[in-house]
Image (spheres, grey):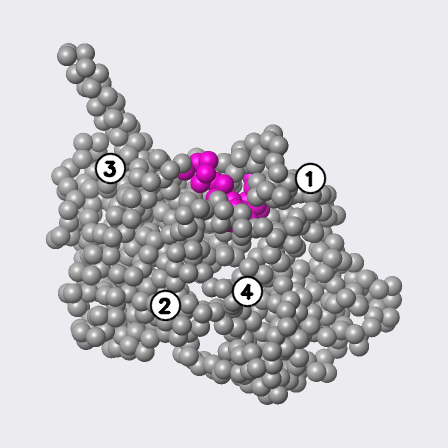
Amino acid sequence: MCCILNIEARVINHNINKNNNTDTQLLQQILSYVNESVAPCDDFYQYACGKWHEGQQLNSYNEIVGMLDHRVNERLVTLLEQLEQRKLQPDSLEAKMLSFYRTCRQSTNVQRYSKHYLELVPPNAQITWPQFVNSSSHWAANKFHWLETLARLRRYGMNNVLFKLDAQPALKNSSSYVLMLDRPNFESSTQRLRVLRITNLMLQSMGYKGSQYELARSVAKLELTVRELAERTAIYDAPPGNYEELSLAQLELYVGGKWRKYLELLLEQRIPANYKLYAYNVDYLVGLMRLLADWDAKVLASYLMLRFVQHLQFETMDSDERIECAQDVRRNMELAANWLYAEHFLPHEQLQPMQAAQQQLFEQLRAQFLLQLNSNRLQLSTEQRQLLREKILNISLNIGNMPQVANRQQFVRQFYADLQLIDNQDYALNHLRLLEFRTRRWFEQLQQPASATNYFYISDSETAYSSSPYFMLRQNVVILPYGILQSPIWAQDSHDIFKYSLFGFMLAHELMHGFESQGLLYDTHGNFNKLGVQISQSSSYADSVSCLLQNETDYVQEREADIAGIRLAYDLYFGLNSHFNQSQVSFTQLPLKQLFFLNVAQFFCGNAKSDSFVDHDSDELRLRQMLINFTPFAEAFGCQQDRDKMHPADKCQLW
Ligand SMILES: [Zn+2]
């Protein structure tokens, strides 16, 4: 008897130690980043992240999600190199992934050059790009048709050049995809030509023999003219419903241009003339046709070529290193990479308890938001609240961006069944095939949209290689990439305070994207809903948003999600209805509430320069905005109102 007890005692002890170890390790890591010489009430970012840089200099990533991504890539390298040792069926999924990995590793520089891509993708079957003919005066300008060339380039994923064309869920019926046509955007640097000097260098590297400066200036002038047209004709503040439903025949009549042929080339099938699409900013499209009708064909062709090359540069790592090639497999074959990763690193017995715990946290956050809705700070009508209640109840969680089908392996194999890669070293050739494959699958949603159960996002390559969670507005799904299920963001055997602070905040932030000024426009089915528009335009909601805008931002919806998210996650743990044990933990003297804020804050630590953030404010600004508006933060650290920078008296609140 004694021995059994002893063994049991040892087992129990071992578990306690294990938990303690995890908690202690997490805590030590958190504390190692803290710069105690900074007062938390003065500058919480510097306090929480001041020493983050120490020990990170040698790493290639510059923030916490980057670190997790790096680990995912390392693991994929291991898997891919194991596959190399195995005998694989030539047509198997594993063989296809390995084939692209090998191509990436072994390809010569020449096979990666833009020039090589351009040889493989000419403007059409009859002509090549102007610089590839001996004397550019021999280039057959009359055989160049810009709309046709754009259709060919669109097949490799290039969009937003001269116009945008995409398949998206219909505004009032998210389960059906429609084609949308719109003017292009020029806001971000990837949406326009590079500076003159770079354009010049690009032309040089592509073998352009004439005066590069002259051509660089001519294409820049073309882009500027198109941009001015777009700005002149744009309908600003247009609600998403401001489109015209036009058949192809009508579009060709009103706007001009062979749109039917464009679509047939893009979708590789016959399209009837009465096929409908949704056109925004029709005046712009009319103006564009007129403008380009007598523009120099060589300049126009060169413009499309340069934008195509920029698109390709954005789509590739341009490296044959192991890690970058694994990342390349991930960004070009996301579903396959996710499946392979989970098969080996997240076996059922490990994934299942994590999934259960995260699903539970998700349910708790949902219940917490229902409580907020009931308190009705924004004084919404019963009908309005009912809309939001239904919506929050319908949002689901997808872990790993995977379809919820019984046989995943079969599903994934089927998805890639008609992907044909060439088992050689020609990087451009295989890369183009993958880009084309993804576009084809994307547009197939026009005929066959995914149902709620087999839904997964056919993601763009940037999303595909990132472990950051995201919210799919029209599907009402929060997607949690597998990469996020790692310490320090999620440690299964750690104390709740670790799991419910940072991970809780991340999940709450995504959930709140359904309830910020953009998210509110869509209902429980992801359909545009006028009642939601009413809420976002109501004086109480609009006041909250303009409060947030006192400090300017281009990303107000992100700020809304941050501010609503921190409140939701915090109230779940420490609020009146909390089920969590609030007593002091044994592994630290630090009050739980301080630990909560520190752990959340360190998500924002990093080396990135403040001008390198995309779609968000800088991390430092995000954190400050979030905390200065949240009284419990000031209370947790004993900040003095209006005396300390982190505790102004005027605060903004959303929900
Ligand atoms: Zn966000």
Q: Looking at the picture, which amino acid does disc 3 mark?
A: His
The answer, for residue 415, to whether it is visible in the render is yes
Q: Looking at the picture, which amino acid does disc 2 mark?
A: Gly
Q: Quadrant of residue 352?
A: top left
In the rendered structure, which disc, 1 or 2, sits on the residue that comes first in sequence?
Answer: 1
Mark 4 lies on residue? 443
Q: Is mark 3 within 8 Å of ligand 1?
A: no
Q: Nearer the viewer, mark 1 or mark 2?
A: 2
In the rendered structure, which disc, 3 or 4, sits on the residue that comes first in sequence?
Answer: 4
Residue 409 in the image: above or below residue 32 = below
Gap between marks 2 and 4, in whole Å? 19 Å
Mark 1 lies on residue? 106
Assess whether mark 4 and mark 3 are in contact (beta carbons under 8 angstroms). no
The residue sitting at 52% across, 73% down in the picture is 179
Q: Secondary structure at mark 1?
A: helix
Q: Residues within 10 Å of mark 4 (few under 14, many from 20)?
A: many
Question: Magenta region: which residues?
Answer: 323-346
| Front one among 15 and 360 | 360
Gap between marks 1 and 2, in whole Å? 45 Å
Residue 62 located left or right of residue 651: right
Mark 3 lies on residue? 495
